[in-house]
Image (cartoon, rainbow, N blue to C red):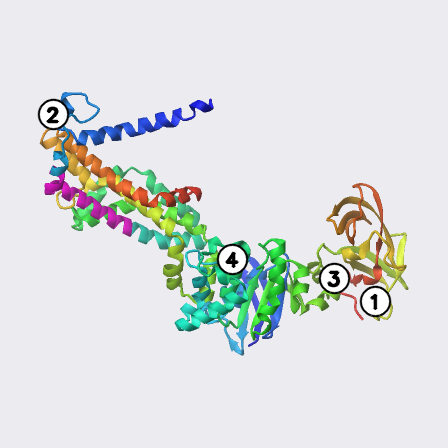
Amino acid sequence: MKRYAWLIPTIYIIFLMLPIYWLVTMSFKTTNEILGSFTLFPQRFTLDNYRTIFTDPTWYWGYINSIIYVSLNTVISVAAALPAAYAFSRYRFLGDKHLFFWLLTNRMAPAAVFALPFFQLYSAIELFDTHIAVALAHTLFNIPLAVWILEGFMSGVPRQLDETAYVDGYSFPAFFTKIFIPTIGAGIGVAAFFCFMFSWVELLLAKTLTAVYAKPIAATMTKTASTSGYELGLLAAAGTLTIIPGAIVIWFVRNYIAKGFALGRV
Amino acid sequence: MSLQLKGVGKTIGADTHIFPTDLELEPGTFNTLLGTTLAGKTTLMQLMAGLEIPTQGEIWFDGKNVTGTAVQSRNVSMVYQQFINYPMLSVFENIASPLRVGRYPRQEIKRRVGEIAELLRISPMLNRKPSELSGGQQQRCAMARALVKESDLILLDEPLANLDFKLREELRDELPKLFAERECVVVYATTEPSEALLLGGQTAAMHEGRIVQFGVSSEIYETPNTLKSAQVFSEPPINLVNVVKRGTKIHLGEATKWTAPKGIPNFVDGEYIFAIRPHHVTPTRPSTTAAIIYGIVDVAELSGSESIIHFQAHDRPWISLSHGVHPFAAGTKAKLYADVVNGLYFTPNGQLVTS
């Protein structure tokens, strides 16, 4: 049995990587080749698809829009979650456990439930088609998640550390910013990573709340596909580029995530 | 710079953590809070530090009422049982932290940290992170931080409890020297009576949120004023048994009796609780006046140089602590000797019978 121990992981990785490989090779093919024949490697290697994306404003603005609202959302979510998580980890108040669980239940409702009311409400206050609109909409599921993750990390820090800092003479704000936040840096990294990922892959709310100026890349992809026929090579290139930010973020926080799993909160 | 607690109490919800307590600690003294876990030692220290606000009573420091003063403006230091250091700062920065907050000049910080690190023998580790140190070194770092600023009050909450035996002994020997030349009030919490005795100074014996006795450590050990105090200050637990005084004799059960101590006017005939520490109950006869106790052995713990024998006699568990190896099989009959002249007599409501 031991001799075949490599088999299962190998099969798993092949199944996992195959679609991604297919996407990447497709992005280097022409649409004709994709539709015409079945090839494992690009017969006529082309960078045209990427050239189009990096030169056409409707394409690259899709990326910029996505990155803007995702970054905004990450900053807002983590900033709002830090004090909330601190309260949950350090204080006992009426209904704290229920509230903590209720936070998570926000994640159980599908985004479609909120799409229509959000559309109306954001339009009413003239936030429709702005980056901040999407960023705020995504805090709906990202703040609870960030609170949940950060609370785990904060509870791993002994309360005596807070007391030691006060004894040393730190005021609460000084302690929180100079001592506490660096101490749970790993947790903030993990929380930011998940906020980034969930905001990056969320499509429905982002599409509903934008039209032109803040249109996310995923929306650009679907719209291009429907208007100018099937430009599969272009779509594949756009898809490949969409994976990259996530991959970069994962690379930076990979060690922290392991720690987050060890703490049982991710 | 004396610390005074005037009727200080703390209740959280329906639970009373500290019953109203009066205590006065003088500067330059070493004070031990002795009690089992949940006796309220940590809560009392938090009240002294200002980390918790008392629900009643007042705390005075150096003639000033500091009850409502925040911990930041009280000039106190605290060391915990867990090795608490700032994980992302180097050992140097950890020790320097209170000085940095106090805006000391750079040169002064460097000099002071260097001195204190030398004193606690962690000079070679100043550039490392706390996580790269051994447990003993981490605790030395925490102590250095507590000592580096000239605090008026230094609180040590079981600082040696998480260290292994060797390190504990080493650090315990150094402790009194560290505080010898300081004009501050030192409060040290421990669960171990032997530690209170070794460290000297004064002891406040605590039990369930009350200070049952306060005084010079060795005096409390020799003459605990109440049964509770005697129980707190004994490890292994002190042996207690009901006796009856009739005339000049003390009767234990039907068969055992011995001569009552003389010259105590209020030691009238009646029922008493006789308390005798485990090391005065031995398998060998210590003196001709010792009383013989017949018991059934529960278990005998032999640790090389010492034997601890748990046995049942007179319908209650006893513990004997003696030097040397004295093997007893469980369930066998044992004949032990209680050196009754070293025993203490308490009235049924727990007061010591004294002259």
Q: Are marks 4 and 1 on the same chain?
A: yes
- Which of marks 4 and 3 precedes in the sequence? 4
Q: Are marks 1 and 3 on the same chain?
A: yes
**Amino acid type, residue under disc 2 in the picture:** Asn
Q: Main secondary structure of the magenta part?
A: helix
Q: Nearer the viewer, residue B108 or B306?
A: B108
Report the magenta residues as a range. Answer: A52-75
| Res. B54 in view | no
Residue at numbered disc 1: B267
**Amino acid type, residue under disc 3 in the picture:** Gly
Residue at numbered disc 3: B350
Chain where mark 2 sits: A
Pointer 4 local density, CA inside 10 Å: few below 14, some 14–19, many at least 20: many
Q: Are marks 4 and 2 in contact (CB under 8 Å)?
A: no
**Amino acid type, residue under disc 4 in the picture:** Gln
Label number found at residue A32:
2
Q: Residue at x 16, y 25 (%)?
A: A43
Q: Which is more foreground, mark 3 or mark 2?
A: 2
Chain where mark 4 sits: B
Q: Position of residue B242 (x, y in %)?
A: 81, 56
Residue at numbered disc 4: B138
Compute the Cα span from label 4 to label 2. 67 Å
